[in-house]
Image (spheres, rainbow, N blue to C red):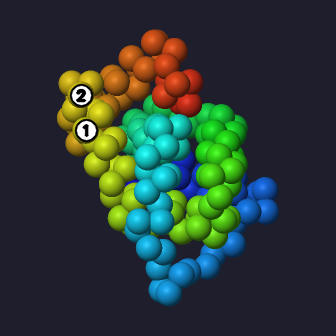
Amino acid sequence: MSRLPLNLALGALALTGFAVLTTLGGGARADRYDALRADPVIENGLLIAAIGTYFDEHCPSFELREGRARSAAFNLGMRALGMGYSPSEIEAYIDSEDEKARVLARAEAWFQQQGADPDVSEEVCQVARDEIAGDTTIGRLIRER
């Protein structure tokens, strides 16, 4: 599975000259990212990206509005920079398999809260239609072809 919006976040960082991969002793300390996890703008932005990815992967009749996704990713990156994180720390955070799994679990829980089984494409696609019809932040990130 591609995780396209998360990859767009990395791409937006790279396009703005921020993406430089480094590691800290073989990997960043997990507790270093507590402030990112605690920031509601970043945490919700990553959740929205994960939900958008679900729509992209499960609903062939939907597509991601890439310009909006890039803009949102850029803004999240700038916010993290403003919190004192380096470009390489931001990339390491976004690339972390543990963080991807954590955000993906939150996205799956969100689908369940919407009454949809995240493993049933028809239910996921109906949630996408509902989000578009409701003109939500998530709905504005995608469009039906």
Q: Which mark identifies residue 58?
A: none
Identify which residue, 89 or 54, lies in the foreground: 89
Three-letter code, disc 1 = Ala
Residue 54 in view in this figure: yes
- Residue displayed at 50% across by 52% down: 36
Query: Is 45 above or below relative to 12?
Result: above
Residue 113 locus on image (x, y percent)? 24, 28
**In the orientation shown, which residue stands out farthest toward the bottom?**
25
The image quadrant where one finds the C terminus is: top right
User: Which structural element holds mark 2?
Assistant: helix
Q: Which mark identifies residue 113?
A: 2
- Residue displayed at 43% across by 20% down: 131
User: Which structural element holds mark 1?
Assistant: helix
Residue 10 locus on image (x, y percent)? 62, 58
The image quadrant where one finds the N terminus is: bottom left
Answer with left or right where residue 38 lies relative to residue 18: left
Query: Is 34 above or below relative to 112?
Result: below
Contact between labelled residues 1 and 2, with CB atoms less than 8 Å apart: yes
Answer with left or right where residue 125 lies relative to residue 20: left
Query: Is 114 above or below relative to 72?
Result: above
Query: Is 64 above or below relative to 90?
Result: above
Q: Residues within 10 Å of mark 1 (few under 14, many from 20)?
A: some
Q: Which residue is mark 1?
A: 109
- Residue displayed at 28% across by 48% down: 105
Answer with left or right where residue 119 lies relative to residue 70: left
As measured in the structure, the alpha-carbon distance from the residue carrying label 2 to the one carrying label 1 is 6 Å
Query: Which quadrant holds residue 101?
Result: bottom left
- Residue displayed at 48% across by 53% down: 35
Three-letter code, disc 2 = Gln
Residue 27 locus on image (x, y percent)? 47, 79
Q: Residues within 10 Å of mark 2 (few under 14, many from 20)?
A: few
